[in-house]
Image (tube, grey):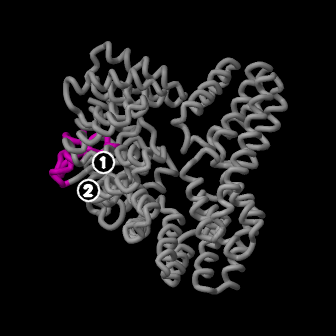
Amino acid sequence: MMDFTKKRVLIIDDSSAMCASLKHTLGNLGIGKCETSNSGNEAIFRIRQREFDIIVCDYCLGEGSDGQQILEQLRKSSLISPSVAFLMVTAERGYEKVVSCAELAPDDYLLKPFTPETIRLRLERVFEKKETFKVVYELLAQGNSAGAIVECDRLLDLKNKFAIDLIRMKGELLISLDRHEEARVLYEQVISARAIPWAKIGLAKTLSMAGMVEEAIEILELAIADTPQYLEAYDLLAKEHETQGQTALAQAILEQAVEISPQTLSRQTHVGEMAYRNGDLEKAKRAFGIVVDQGKYSFFRSPSDFIRLSKVHLDEGQQDKALSVIADARKSFDKTPDFELETSVMESLIYHGASNREASMLALEKALEMKEKNGLVLPESSHLDLAKSCFLNDKVEEGRSLVKDIVSNFYDDEKVQAMVGQMLEQVGRAEESKELVENSVRDVIKLNNEGVLLAKKGDLAGAIALLVSAAQRMPQNVQVALNAAHALIVDSDRNGWNETQMDMARYLLREHEAKYSSLEKYKKINGMMKEVGLKFGVNIT
């Protein structure tokens, strides 16, 4: 029998009585370190403050986030390590169907009512599995995905009882390392034995990575037909169609997913963004409205949720509603420089739409001052909105400079360039669009090529000076950042460990990790950084 006396537990339930009951039940297992939370936000606050070994969370938490949303927030934000046991408690008999289709599932679940013996057996199984995966988790924490795959193979050779979980882990790791051919063979072997939904999803990913888009789409459509509740399939299918420029079809697919699970706010946001790009303001307004309304219970709500909804109201000519949404945002968030900048940009556009030129100019000047004073980097859409406000308020040179900035940062992003062209057309400067974009793209390509050429000639110092300076001027340009990081890493490799330069390389890579870590070039340079670190006895995670 496993000893639970040293385990620290967090119970999440909106019912104080149920928390007390669960605490008593866990006490019968010898657990004395037990804390309780009555809401998702309170639970996340506690988890940020200290580490727990076990989290027992009720699926239905009344008004606000449900247990599945909390789990997804914790996992996606890396607030809990893989060693933490997460158990979901529910009275819903259909939960097994829900959890089997969830992209991020709990370690186990408990159907009410349950006995102390039931929870003991579940916890013992969970920790047995986590002990099996212990070395895999340790290798992943070190950034050694290749080593983790080798460990998965070692355990599979031993005919481990958690073989199917090991295969799933191995497949995901192979994909993360771009070893998609090996992953494809693995998933096909699984499917030949049993048509498991996650294996179909994995197979579709490998086909897409190999450029076999039509085949990937076919697999995803079959996965949805066979298991309509498996929402990741909708996301991937929508992404494939979006990549091919079929945005209306991508929107329709995402709408099917939110009909099944309307509580997933990130997917609602994606629906809204897709609808907005397609000119479907009514559906964009509905999706963004849901995000703002339900997001008030979320620990991860963002001012951007309000700005998106405000922009839709503005496009519909409803300036009062647009301003009201921004006013609500001002009541809901701390007045950070980023927040003040983004809301001021939006207010400038709203006041201009209401023909209040004086208020529009004041808000614009505040935004420009905030950006200059704090050196802030805006999201693409807000950056374009700021440029748009400059043009509308006759600050033409400032507008052109901002357009040049965003094109320079996203010179190889066709979607951003299309957004730039659309914005310039809206402000009556369509004739300038081609020249502005082409000149900006040409300048950044020339600079980038100069840096790469210097590095090839062996002038690493010159390449580093040029590319790092460019990366600082264009903080959202991933290609410049990767080339700068590469030059910095090569210099340490050839000339000896340089802590300052390697810190800069680490910084450049981490700044682009969230958005571009799947790029082959990113993976290659990130891997090189770790190899150089090991060469000099430095473990880079």
Residue 311 badge: none
Please tell me which residue is depicted at 71% across the width and 50% down the height of the picture. 440
What segment carries the magenta color? 91-120
Indicate the position of residue 227 as horizontal and vertical percent values: 21, 43
Question: Farthest top residue?
Answer: 157
Q: Is residue 119 magenta?
A: yes
Q: How many marks?
A: 2
Q: Earlier in the sequence, mark 2 or mark 1?
A: 1
Left or right of residue 96: residue 410 = right
Residues 132 and 4: in front is: 132
Please tell me which residue is depicted at 76% across the width and 24% down the height of the picture. 456
Residue 516: name its quadrant.
top right
- Residue type (three-letter) at the residue carrying disc 1: Leu
Indicate the position of residue 520 as horizontal and vertical percent values: 54, 31
Residue 370 seen in render: yes
Left or right of residue 449: residue 141 = left
Q: Is residue 324 magenta?
A: no
* Residue at numbered disc 1: 231
Left or right of residue 304: residue 484 = right
